[in-house]
Image: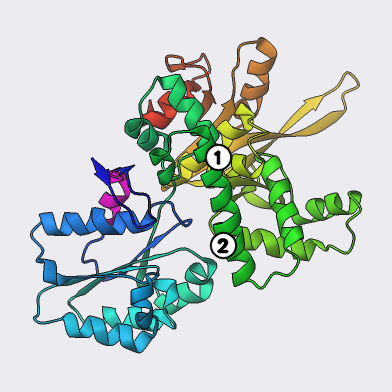
Amino acid sequence: MWKSTKDGSENMKEIKRNYYLQKLIKRKENGRIKIITGIRRCGKSYLLNPLFKNYLLESGVDKDHIINLDLDYRENKKYHNPDVLFEFVMEQRKDDKMYYVLLDEIQEVEDFESVLNSFLGKGNLDVYVTGSNSRFLSNDIKTEFRGRGDEIRIYPLSYQEFFAATTGSDEQKWNQYITYGGMPYILSLDTDEDKSGYLKDLFENTYLKDIIERNNIYKDEILDKTVDILSSSVGSLTNPKKIADTFTSQGIKDISHKTINAYINFLLDSFMITKAERYDIKGRKYITTPSKYYFVDIGLRNARLNFRQIEQNHLMENIIYNELLMRGYNVDVGVVEQFSNDEQGKTTRKQLEIDFVCNQGSKRYYIQSALNIDDDEKKKQELRPLLNVNDFFKKIIIVKDDIVAYHNEEGILIIGIKEFLLKENSLDI
């Protein structure tokens, strides 16, 4: 089935996005504001309308009990005034039955926090909104909602979603995904030229332009170079001071680590990148710096570097990280210490890194990402950190090879990347 979409992507294949749709359905009429967040063009609007709107209609909700506004459309600009928006919604209420309020790009509305909170006080309004930028997710807004907001974070297409919506061999699908990522509109483009051009334009003229304008940045060349450094160092430990030192080494002076830190926060707030902090597993404490940064979509990262650095190990790690976030895990970089004695009896201490420590309620998983573990030295390198964790939580190594998942003699699960991504319960095999 082909569908015309809000961002102009006519001919884009319809993707159900069932995982997120079920989250909305589960929260239906729970007395809280359902807040759909995520990077622009990742499918938030499409989730709200038509997917959720069609669900409401199919479940018996009358059409006139669904109040739907796309607030970034020119014809709806008058509703950016909070009083006008409030009055409009109130006028649609004709009886005591439940009304479903679907508001796309709510951050366009002035003082939208008070409007949304006022809607909740009316009893028969069930409110769903989308938003894309830092203003929408600031701590002030979370405080303003006073626990009455329910955030649903949406990501670009997962590999499972991409796999189901595309044709070709498994290897062709993987190569397309690891190169061009999962921005939904990519599925409507046929050529490599069109796909790369779309991603470059999206990065430059939507995301970066939005950040520059919203934060009144006047040294945009420094923002550009910061983005380039982060793009090149996916999966590597870094911090603002290290990036500032890189500028200095390149002859660019008077750039403080505070400026770099502010720019990184702008990128985080826009949902372009995410941050994984280091966690001392035995000491049970966070190590504040350095950290790792990952791109929310690997295609955007590749486009930023003009598709010059397609290193499967780093991209695979980024894709695994995004998948774990999408599945609802809290994800950190694990640090564990190894102590050994030399021939003179001197004790040495070495810090070993576990790619991901994933927590969800009482569940925890330790995960290593590796292209392969074919030779003994590589296998020891990946196993060493996991074997130095003295607890009984599950330990996993994800490899690129298409293998049949198995447990080794230490009980560690070895699983291929595609099986991990395509099976929802893959961590519990």
Residue nearest the observer in this picture, 260 or 117? 260
Quarter of the rendering containing residue 298: top right
Q: Nearer the viewer, residue 418 or 310?
A: 310
Q: Most prominent secondary structure in the magenta stretch?
A: helix
Looking at the image, tell me whether mark 2 or mark 1 is earlier in sequence order.
1
Question: Label 2 sits on what residue type?
Answer: Asp
User: Disc 1 residue type?
Assistant: Ser
Q: Secondary structure at mark 2?
A: helix
Residue 331 shows in the view: no
Q: Is residue 200 shown in magenta?
A: no
Q: Which residue is mark 1?
A: 196
The range drawn in magenta is: 14-25
The x and y percentages for residue 148 are 35, 72
Residue located 39% across and 81% down the image: 80
Per the image, label 1 sits on a secondary structure element best described as: helix
Residue 22 on the magenta segment: yes
Residue under the point 59% across and 22% down? 371
The residue positioned 51% from the left and 13% from the top of the image is: 409
* Residue 310, image quadrant: top right
Residue topped by disc 2? 269
Q: Position of residue 182 (x, y in %)?
A: 45, 41
Query: How packed is label 1: few (under 14 Cα within 10 Å), some, or many (20 or more)?
Result: many
Neighbourhood count class around disc 2 (C-alpha, 10 Å): few under 14, some 14–19, many 20 upward: many
Q: Which mark is residue 100?
A: none
Task: Classify the position of the C terminus by image quarter.
Answer: top left
Determine the residue positioned at 76% across, 56% down: 240
Q: Position of residue 388 (x, y in %)?
A: 64, 29
Q: CA distance from mark 2 to mark 1?
A: 25 Å
**Residue mark closest to the camera, 2 vs 1:** 1
Quarter of the image for residue 113 reads bottom left
**Quadrant where the N terminus lies?**
top left
Judging depth in this view, the residue of 412 and 44 nearest the camera is: 44
